[in-house]
Amino acid sequence: MDKEIPFPQDEYGLSKDRAADVRRAFHYQDTVGAQLLIGSLQGNSYVEIWFEHYEDIIAVKENGLIDVYQVKTKSSESKWKSNDKSVIDSINRFCDLEKKYSKSIRKYFFYSNNDVYIPQSSSNSTDDIIRSPLSIKDLIINEKVYAEIGPLLNKWIDRIQQPFAIIKAVLAKMEFIKGKSLTGFQYEVTAELSTLPKINALPQHVVQDISDSLLTIINRANSLDTSAIELYLSITTTNGLSENQNINKRITINEARKVVYKIPKKIFYKKIKSSLVAVSIIVMLSFLAFYNLKPESLLERSIRILKSAKDTSIPPEFDEAVSAIRNNKFPLDNIDLSGANFQCKDLSGLTLRRGIFIGIRGTGVNFDSSNLYLAQFGRFSELNASSFKNALMDESNFENANMIGSSLNNTIARSANFKNATLNGANLSNGDFTSSDFSKVNFTLAELNSTNMRYTILTEANLQDVNVSNADLRDTIGLDQKMLDKTCFSPKNPPIVSAPLIINARSCYNSESKHKERQIMQHALKVVGIMSILNGFCDKGKVINRPPDIPSRPDLNIEIPISSNDI
């Protein structure tokens, strides 16, 4: 029997407890700090980062100048406007610092998961112009104030409650940074660490351990963590904290380097020790090989290359190896490729029965027409925008996998486990998922057109705007009337359901324009799913990095050629 939620809320409305949002905001701030530390390890000029010392983050450069960061998050997608309280408060705080430490401060940064508002280039509305923090910055710094906008600008300046000269000095130094969204930032520290020398060759779970260690020292710097001896044997400073409590807010780049490279050093020394033991064995094997030389076949070499991808980055010959195995129709039953990086790779048409793919990085991977009977993809495998069209996946395990915008058209996956997976915007049309477990799955905007879902488990699944036209939903477990009413279908092809459930007509779209709008939303989910992980897109089996647009250089902006999800 499912556990009941304590204190159930009978009416719709946001929870009064915002603790989760607050914790996520602090986690986002810690991630920004981690990215600054990692960037400095790659050659950027910061020598130390301070946390919660006067501001969220202050970063000291080699020349002693300081960059000040205010990190703000928004759960909504609305852009930051000039009159937003967080913008006003941040500028006010920057002004307080400018009055005391102007010569020491190089830049002020307003860092957020959301963009700042910028009016249309064709707009001459003073209301639109005054809403934009960047427009106000331009007006004040370049002294472009004119009669129509003067009163509005003065009203905004009065809200800051600081001398005009200080406000102007702050805006001249102030920049706005658009960071990762709140749905993808958790992966950023691991992704950034994987770009560092020596770290990029480590298994994914080891990189994750390094990420956890780095975030731990950042959390300690944020929390005034210090020993009793350091606390009581240290003088109290002007801000009410002990000298050691203030110093412990600082993380130098050398300290960060020790944390990041501590595990790789252990691995290195362990390898040296192992190599000394193995020297005699290598000599013996070399001697035996000299008298028993046997050339390695192309197929044997290809299998060896494929297996070497476990827990690490794939070798350069990977694509050719997969092609050779596919052409020879060689089965790879029971192969273990856990932790491998298959982003954007083509693994279609392979026999991978009982394969182990736990924790793989498989954004954009292609398993079309592959045999994945009893395959294991659990433990948060990353499979956004992946493709499993025409694949055989009976009794396979995708529990907790991220599969936003994935294609599972014509897939046979009976008695499979998709519990807690994310299938937003996915296409499961014409597939057979009889007796599979979809409990707690998010199906928002998914396509289940003519899909066999009989005997499946749908307990606590999110079926918002799911197309169930002609789907077989008989004898499902956990499907109630409220869930069914959230779905939609073609009036000519209603789903098949078991009593006492009834079908209430709710069309997915009633015009070609609404159909196009639905496709655009599904495509957007797929784009977000792939961009949030890769910070780019797939092109011919390769990951192409796609930095944010540069408004002043449209010629450098890269179009994202991500295809629709066959829907």
Image: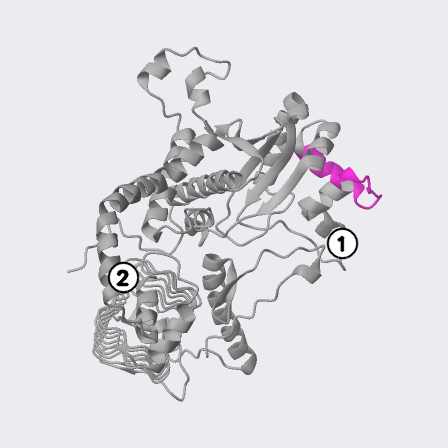
Residue under the image location 20 percent in, 78 percent down: 475
Q: State whether residue 366 is above or below residue 276.
A: below
Query: Mark 2: few, some, or many residues within 10 Å (few <14, many ≥20)?
Result: many
Q: Position of residue 167 (x, y in %)?
A: 70, 32
Helix, strand or loop under label 1: loop
Q: Is residue 144 magenta?
A: yes
Q: Is residue 478 left or right of residue 249?
A: left
Alpha-carbon span between mark 1 and mark 2: 53 Å
Report the residue at 71% width, 28% height from top.
166
Residue at the extreme right of the image, as rendered: 147
Q: How many marks?
A: 2
Which residue extends farthest front?
291
**What residue does disc 1 label?**
125
**Residue bearing the label numbered 2:** 378
Q: Kindly identify the residue that appears in the image at 36 percent across and 82 percent down.
A: 327
Residue 465 in sight from this viewpoint: no
Assess whether residue 397 is covered by the magenta stretch. no
The region drawn magenta spans: 140-159
Give the residue type that dot 2 points to.
Gly
Amino acid type of the residue that numbered disc 1 sits on in the rendered structure: Ser
Callout 2: helix, strand or loop? loop
